[in-house]
Image: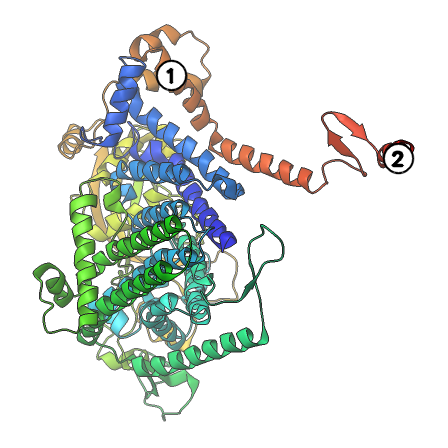
């Protein structure tokens, strides 16, 4: 169990490390003083208080430079501490995880639009649970080891169940008809290298995959809270399979890895497992017997059979009359029962799911509260140290309180559940049900009165609702080839994809110049560019361009105008976010929106979709991955130093960030160009000596991309220590003791002399 907790905390540290490195590499271009959306620090925030403290203790001119330098410092130290936590469990200290939690909460809150994703919330919520696990004395008390694993397991249940519930509640046809994956691979934010291949799969396979996803997210999410390990392991395996498939077909940074990390808590042993102690002071070892193996296998198989039965209740599989389409005219063929014309349908409606959720959440929470209460009662009546009993009871009570806080956001899933918790409409229910409602009410009281006002603690419990509805879904009724809904596969409308994508065009050269498209690093643009694998790194500009295209116009995404303005000014930190080297010759920029779709393989089901481009899979030369249509203007031509643009950005507070940063800009420019002129006096006069030292260091780090230095140092030193402890560092049978090299022969001779002395003395 100790190793399990250690592995869990190390995996959380890996997610922290990925998040901090990703933040550091993009901060200057996204949220720096000259970034797209400069960080705005509220006077009431903790960051502003800390900066003011640094200003009063170091230099009166510190604030103008403090914002960017402080973010660099915080990210740099966090990368170092995350690396330490990964290499050794000795550094799994509460203060370390507290620092990582505060650090990422501070950095993400100052990143505005670019840092408002659900995985930021999931990382902070998991980080706080990791902090609690380091505070609990799980290595000393067995009962506490079992109960503490409920925290990450309940978070995993909440994440998956809420994500599955909102899909049904949204009444999106792609989910109710199980056609979501026929759009998802092409319309997700950043498709991966395998997305194009998965997009060509048979419709029945894609719809069966959607059904499996709903099964895993809804009923299978309950398995991770089961009291027996065999059932939990099955639930964990299903969740891991889902996350691995998402990893293979998309780019979702550290989100999938973090979800798999939560699954590790399902491996905790049962409280009644037989253990043996091999040596004094060693941790107990699990004793595997035939009885335990048979019991595990029986529970596993029974649960698997029940899931198959439940799948048959949620979904129905049948055959449909299917038509061969040699031309655009439909010709009726004799129906044949084969795998080619299988269809699957969802039997679960939103009202049925709402009624089930309203019953489930309070009863489930009541079960957990009673489970922890029984453990406290057992500890109280067992013999033992009174102080240990009090400590265990307090810790178990704390686990129960935080589970109530974690469960509180789930009251938003149904109106009835929200009315019971906020309006006290729980009368007429069973006692068991009312215990759960009281737990949700208590969790809401803790959140609103103790957590909501704190900018860090308010992020430690959150709502989730991933992929609520599919985007890029074209309306088949508006297409000229569609006569009725029976044209698509399994008597459903054809899955026509229209993914909106913003394309920037720049005018280069003197005079009228030449227009060409500006390339992004990862988002779709070039029709012949294969989607790239970028996860676990998250290119936040490319991600946010997807949301800007969905918004429809730049008025709802004013930061796009700021991006264009920075590109026209050739701001280096912003240009680095693009797949462009130098934009010094750029005169104008304009933006258009296109509807993108993957090209299709020549198959029967793809030929039934109007307007798609069929390609020859055998032709590998100049292969086209994308096709686009419906070009329309998103933003007209924008020139350099346009006053209307400046006014627009000023109105949306998208100008420069904290005023007075000229010293930092001057110093960074001098270091980047290698100018040998003595500008120290000018910089020190603007910023102060203390700030210049910090700025010089972090400017060198950023310009040389030395953020990897703490990672390399920590992992390199740990590798040296491991090699040395294994005896691989020095060749032969030699040992290094305080600078003296002794061979085996020398040691043998010394032992012989010692024996002779003992005999003579005797």
- Mark 1 and mark 2 lie on one chain; the one further toward the N terminus is 1
The residue positioned farthest toward the bottom in the image shown: 334
The residue positioned farthest toward the front in the image shown: 762
Q: Which residue is mark 1?
A: 667
Which quarter of the figure has residue 147?
Answer: bottom left
* Nearest to the observer: residue 538 or residue 677: 538
Which quarter of the figure has residue 485?
Answer: bottom left
Residue at 53%, 42% in the rendered image: 88
Q: Could you classify mark 2 by the number of other residues whose Cα lies within 10 Å: few (under 14), some (14-19), or many (20 or more)?
A: few
Question: From mark 1 to mark 2, how far is it between C-alphas?
Answer: 78 Å
Residue at 27%, 75% in the rendered image: 177
| Horizontal and vertical percent position of residue 553 | 18, 47
What is the basis of the colouring in this image? rainbow
Left or right of residue 17, residue 610 in this image:
left
* Nearest to the observer: residue 331 or residue 289: 289
Residue at 46%, 42% in the rendered image: 92
Secondary structure at numbered mark 2: loop
Question: Could you tell me which quadrant the C terminus lies in?
Answer: top right
Q: Which residue is mark 2?
A: 762
Which quarter of the figure has residue 456?
Answer: top left
């Amino acid at each position: 169990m100790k190793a399990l907790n250690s592995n869990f905390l190390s995996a959380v540290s890996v997610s922290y490390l990925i998040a901090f490195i990703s933040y550091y590499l993009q901060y200057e271009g996204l949220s720096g003083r000259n970034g797209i959306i400069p960080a705005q620090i509220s006077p009431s925030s903790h960051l502003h208080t800390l900066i003011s403290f640094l200003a009063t203790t170091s230099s009166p001119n510190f604030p103008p430079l403090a914002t960017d330098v402080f973010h660099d410092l915080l990210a740099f130290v966090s990368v170092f501490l995350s690396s330490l936590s990964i290499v050794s469990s000795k550094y799994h200290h509460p203060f370390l995880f507290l620092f990582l939690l505060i650090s990422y909460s501070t950095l993400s809150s100052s990143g505005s639009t670019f840092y408002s994703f659900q995985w930021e919330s999931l990382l902070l919520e998991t980080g706080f649970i990791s902090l609690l696990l380091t505070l609990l004395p799980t290595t000393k008390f067995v009962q506490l080891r079992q109960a503490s694993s409920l925290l990450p397991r309940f978070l995993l249940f909440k994440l998956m169940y809420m994500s599955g519930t909102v899909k049904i509640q949204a009444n999106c046809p792609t989910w109710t008809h199980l056609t979501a994956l026929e759009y998802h691979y092409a319309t997700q934010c950043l498709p991966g290298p395998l997305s194009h291949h998965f997009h060509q799969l048979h419709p029945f396979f894609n719809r069966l995959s959607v059904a499996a996803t709903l099964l895993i997210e809804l009923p299978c999410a309950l398995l991770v809270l089961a009291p027996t390990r065999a059932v939990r392991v099955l639930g964990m395996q299903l969740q891991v399979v889902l996350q691995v498939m998402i990893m293979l077909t998309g780019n979702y940074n550290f989100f999938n890895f973090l979800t798999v990390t939560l699954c590790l808590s399902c491996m905790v042993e049962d409280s009644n497992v037989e253990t043996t102690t091999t040596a004094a002071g060693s941790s107990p070892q699990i004793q595997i017997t035939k009885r335990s193996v048979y019991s595990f296998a029986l529970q596993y198989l029974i649960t698997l059979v029940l899931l198959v039965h439940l799948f048959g209740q949620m979904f129905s599989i049948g055959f449909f009359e299917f038509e061969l389409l040699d031309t655009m005219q439909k010709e009726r063929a004799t129906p044949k029962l084969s795998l080619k014309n299988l269809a699957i349908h969802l039997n679960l409606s939103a009202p049925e799911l709402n009624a089930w959720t309203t019953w489930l959440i309070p009863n489930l929470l009541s079960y957990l509260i009673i489970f922890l209460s029984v453990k406290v009662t057992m500890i109280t009546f067992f013999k033992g140290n009174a102080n240990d009993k009090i400590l265990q009871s307090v810790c178990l009570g704390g686990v129960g309180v935080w589970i109530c806080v974690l469960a509180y956001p789930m009251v938003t899933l149904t109106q009835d559940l929200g009315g019971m918790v906020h309006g006290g409409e729980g009368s007429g229910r069973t006692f068991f049900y009312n215990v759960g409602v009281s737990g949700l009410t208590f969790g809401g009281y803790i959140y609103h009165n103790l957590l909501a006002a704190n900018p860090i603690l308010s992020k430690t419990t959150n709502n989730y609702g991933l992929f609520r509805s599919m985007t890029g879904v074209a309306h088949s009724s508006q297409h000229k080839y569609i006569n009725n809904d029976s044209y698509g596969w399994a008597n459903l409308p054809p899955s026509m994809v229209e993914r909106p994508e913003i394309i920037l065009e720049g005018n280069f050269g003197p005079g009228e110049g030449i227009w060409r498209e500006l390339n992004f690093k990862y988002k779709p643009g070039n029709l012949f560019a294969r989607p790239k694998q970028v996860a676990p790194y998250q290119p936040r500009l490319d991600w946010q361009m997807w949301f800007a295209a969905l918004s429809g116009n730049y008025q709802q995404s004013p930061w796009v105008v700021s991006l264009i303005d920075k590109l026209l000014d050739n701001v280096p930190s912003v240009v680095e976010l693009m797949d462009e080297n130098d934009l010094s010759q750029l005169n104008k920029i304009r933006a258009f929106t296109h509807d993108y779709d993957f090209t299709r393989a020549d198959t029967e089901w793809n030929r039934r979709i109007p307007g798609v481009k069929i390609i020859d899979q055998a032709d590998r030369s100049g292969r086209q991955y994308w096709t686009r249509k419906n070009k329309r203007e998103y933003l007209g031509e924008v020139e350099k130093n346009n006053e209307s643009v400046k006014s627009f950005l000023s109105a949306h507070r998208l100008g420069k960030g904290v005023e007075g940063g000229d010293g930092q800009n001057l110093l960074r420019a001098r270091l980047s160009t290698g100018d040998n002129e003595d500008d120290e006096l000018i910089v020190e006069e603007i910023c102060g000596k203390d700030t210049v030292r910090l700025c010089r260091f972090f400017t060198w780090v950023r310009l040389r991309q030395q953020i990897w230095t703490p990672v390399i140092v920590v992992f390199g030193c740990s590798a040296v220590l491991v090699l040395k402890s294994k005896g691989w560092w020095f060749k032969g049978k030699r040992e290094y003791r305080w600078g003296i090299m002794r061979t085996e022969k020398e040691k043998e001779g010394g032992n012989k002399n010692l024996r002779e002395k003992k005999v003579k003395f005797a």
